[in-house]
Image (tube, grey):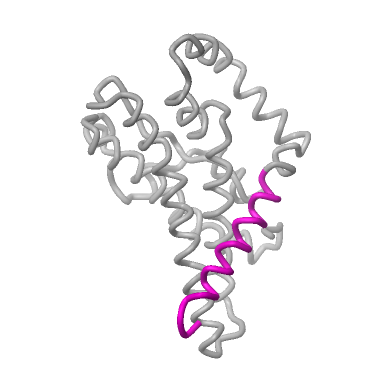
């Protein structure tokens, strides 16, 4: 699990840049696919990490292993299919993190089975695995402004949308409370262990690994 070791924190910086850049790019690209060019017009549909950094979210990721990037500007009313577009645009970010986590763990497995048993590069790959999976899970929590809240909204009947939007103003306090009380870790880390074990099992089934 991610810790406060200075080397681990240093390794998180490039891993963080990779994870959040692809996360936000995925949001922007899928939004464009569904007809919303807002992110592209504002220069956010790119793989430049500096376009996507959020100061507080970045500090959270470096210190505790999960956090957030600067949200890509999306106008769901431009989508060709509102609910479907909102759902897939929101899911795209966590999905790309899970894909990156899987590919990184697969690379880690290949390197270890090839005889590489230590070194900073191997440690970096594992940090990349951990950070991507944690980021993916964290963003699926259905609390605004996280991606999970928008996925949930895409499924809610119209009669519930007004109430759900009303509680958005309290969402930052709810999220802060979950972080301070460490209740968020109780939710995230068991899911993290489950996904790591699942991905590790899948990697072990790949022929030759």
List x then y, in percent, for residue 115. Answer: 55, 90
**Which residue is pictured at 31% across the width and 24% down the height?**
82
Q: Looking at this view, name the residue that lies furthest to the bottom.
A: 115
Left or right: where does residue 156 sit relative to residue 76? right
Identify the residue shown where x is 65% and y is 49%.
191
Query: Where residue 113 sits: x, y (%)?
Result: 54, 86
Predominant SS of the magenta segment: helix
x 54%, y 44%: residue: 58
Q: Residue 73, percent across and down?
A: 35, 29
Q: Of 207 and 3, which appears nearest the observer? A: 207
Q: Percent position (x, y) of residue 143? A: 58, 28
Q: Quadrant of residue 51?
A: top left
Q: What residue range appears in magenta?
A: 188-209
Q: Tell me if residue 98 is in the magenta stretch.
A: no
Relative to residue 23, is residue 4 depicted above or below? below
Q: Is residue 94 above or below residue 183?
A: below
Q: How many marks?
A: 0
Q: Quadrant of the N terminus?
A: bottom right
Q: Is residue 113 above or below residue 147?
A: below
Q: Nearer the viewer, residue 161 or 64?
A: 161
Q: Is residue 46 above or below residue 204?
A: above
Residue 204 drawn in magenta: yes
* Residue in view at x 52 percent, y 47 percent: 136
């Amino acid at each position: 699990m991610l810790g406060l070791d200075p080397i681990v924190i240093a390794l998180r910086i490039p891993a963080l840049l990779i994870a959040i850049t692809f996360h936000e790019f995925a949001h922007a690209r899928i939004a464009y696919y569904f007809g919303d060019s807002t992110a592209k017009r504002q220069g956010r549909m790119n793989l430049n990490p500096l376009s996507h950094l959020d100061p507080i979210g970045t500090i959270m990721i470096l210190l505790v292993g999960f956090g957030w990037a600067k949200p890509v500007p999306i106008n769901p009313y431009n989508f060709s299919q509102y609910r479907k577009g909102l759902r897939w645009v929101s899911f795209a970010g966590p999905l790309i993190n899970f894909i990156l986590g899987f590919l990184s763990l697969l690379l880690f497995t290949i390197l270890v089975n090839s005889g590489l048993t230590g070194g900073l590069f191997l440690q970096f790959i594992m940090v990349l695995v951990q950070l991507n999976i944690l980021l993916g899970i964290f963003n699926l929590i259905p609390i605004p402004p996280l991606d999970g809240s928008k996925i949930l909204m895409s499924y809610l009947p119209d009669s519930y949308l007004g109430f759900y939007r009303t509680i958005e103003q309290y969402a930052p306090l709810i999220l802060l409370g979950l972080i301070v009380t460490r209740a968020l870790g109780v939710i995230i880390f068991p899911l993290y262990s489950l996904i790591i074990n699942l991905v590790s099992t899948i990697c072990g089934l790949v022929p030759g690994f």
